[in-house]
Image: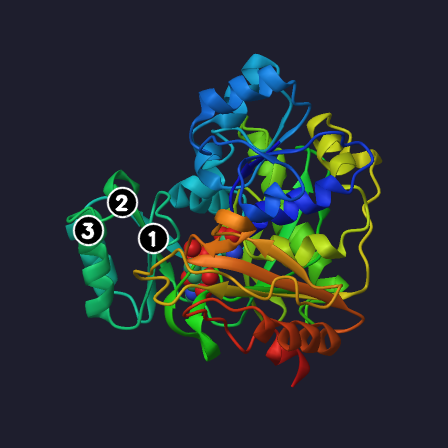
Amino acid sequence: MVIGSGAREHALAWKIAQSPNVTELYVAPGNVGTAAIARNLNIRPNDIEALAKAAQDIGIDLTVVGPEAPLASGIVDHFEHLGIPIFGPTKAATRIESSKVFAKKLMQKYAIPCPKGVTFSNYAEGKKYLESQPVPIVVKADGLAAGKGVIVAGSRGEALKALSDILEAKIFGSAGDSVVIEECLTGREVSLLAFTDGKTVVPMVPACDYKRIFDNDQGPNTGGMGSYSPPGFFDAKLTQRVMETILKPAVRAMANEGIPYKGVLYAGLMIASDRPKVLEFNARFGDPETQAILPRLQTDLVDILLAVIDNRLGEATIKWTDDACVGVVMASAGYPGNYKTGFPITGLNNLDKDILVFHAGTKLGDNSQVYTDGGRVLTVTTTGKNMAEARAKVYQNLPHIHFDGCHYRKDIAAREVN
Ligand code: AMP
Ligand code: GLY
């Protein structure tokens, strides 16, 4: 059973469905894309008790959690307590994502490279500190804020406003009881995700994502408008460096703190002069990185997930293709602000064979017509023997898909081929 309803979860279900170990596959709640390869269960990702009951009633052998919210609410603890196998970190271990203060203190204590940062829960103290710091500067709400809790402030005024919005006006509620004020880094951003059973750490292939809505990184932040793998500059040596200085030390640090970490550990990195530093940890598969990473995975994903759960990741071999993969998100007009849904999507059957369409906000109407049902609607993905080929294929096929007001970025992976 896969928990979640986005394109990340469709990609997970797509890969899991290929496993010879799988006889039945469920997605809760899923979307139109997952319904074609699995059975959708009408249960919300935050309804942990209902998910556990469904897992018991159906006899689910393995559950994989997509989004962070159920992890942060303790879905893994609940399932483990009931003896239901589940892939992901416990509530305490998910703190590496759900509390930026926790993550920063962990990195500082164990000398894991990260931007200089100081924690505040008092506005006046935070203000005094801000006034002593250069700009730009970054203000981060401690808790989960649906991807909106990080403000990269270009001026002191903007930083002070963010501080006051979070600590005084409580725009993120209790997620803003404290903040981290952080040095602003420049460089290239890369996501390196790893599987870990708490002891062995195995990296996936690196990926880049695009957070802004418009080309050339203009406009507001979104849940992600596209991704690709691999970034050309991020070679095996850099992966090794991130493994030795960041991912392995983080997993060891968690064990040392008495909070064993199992699942996917996602390092959001800034790289300047070959020196990677951690902008954030996530406790799960990334979205949209997963849509560009899993098509490159040769190994049976179910074997990997079970090896993690059973603490035998050290025995697993994980293989990747040398292909390049590009995924472009098609979004509704107005996203990430207000948008309308319910528009028919055409052209889905009019694509080249090797185009993968991972659904996110989609819904089935009468006579099998697919309709838009969210801000991010589809991730259109393909692989190629190099980035230029993958990118050309995706962009040749995208115009075949249409819905009213559809928007996608034209520059995903462009920097890799120009
Ligand atoms: P996060 O939600 O932590 O991934 O932050 C969102 C985005 O803010 C990141 O993808 C970066 O582009 C940016 N960001 C976060 N922290 C920093 C930092 N210390 N310096 C520069 N940019 C940052
Ligand atoms: N791609 C960013 C995230 O999954 O949080």
The residue carrying mark 1 is 149
User: Badge 3, how many Cα within 10 Å: few under 14, some, many 20+?
Assistant: few
Would the CB of label 1 be found within 8 Å of ligand 1?
yes
Would the CB of label 2 be found within 8 Å of ligand 1?
no
The residue carrying mark 3 is 125
Residue 215 appearing in the image: yes
Instruction: Find the distance from the CA under tag 3 to the CA under tag 1.
Output: 20 Å
Question: Residue lying furthest bottom in this view?
Answer: 418
* Three-letter code for the amino acid on which mark 1 is drawn: Gly
Q: Nearer the viewer, mark 3 or mark 1?
A: 1
The residue carrying mark 2 is 176
The answer to which quarter of the image holds residue 249 is top right
Asked if the residue under mark 1 is in contact with the one under mark 2, i.e. CB atoms within 8 Å, the reply is yes
* Residue sitting at x 34%, y 45%: 142
Return the x and y of residue 301 as percentages of the image width and height: 74, 41
Q: Tag on residue 305?
A: none
* Three-letter code for the amino acid on which mark 3 is drawn: Glu
User: Badge 1, how many Cα within 10 Å: few under 14, some, many 20+?
Assistant: many
- In what element is the residue under mark 3? helix
- Of mark 3 and mark 2, the one earlier in the sequence is 3
The N terminus lies in quadrant? top right
Return the x and y of residue 390 as percentages of the image width and height: 72, 72
Instruction: Find the distance from the CA under tag 3 to the CA under tag 2.
Output: 15 Å
Depth check: give the residue in front, 308 or 226.
226
Depth check: give the residue in front, 404 or 87.
404
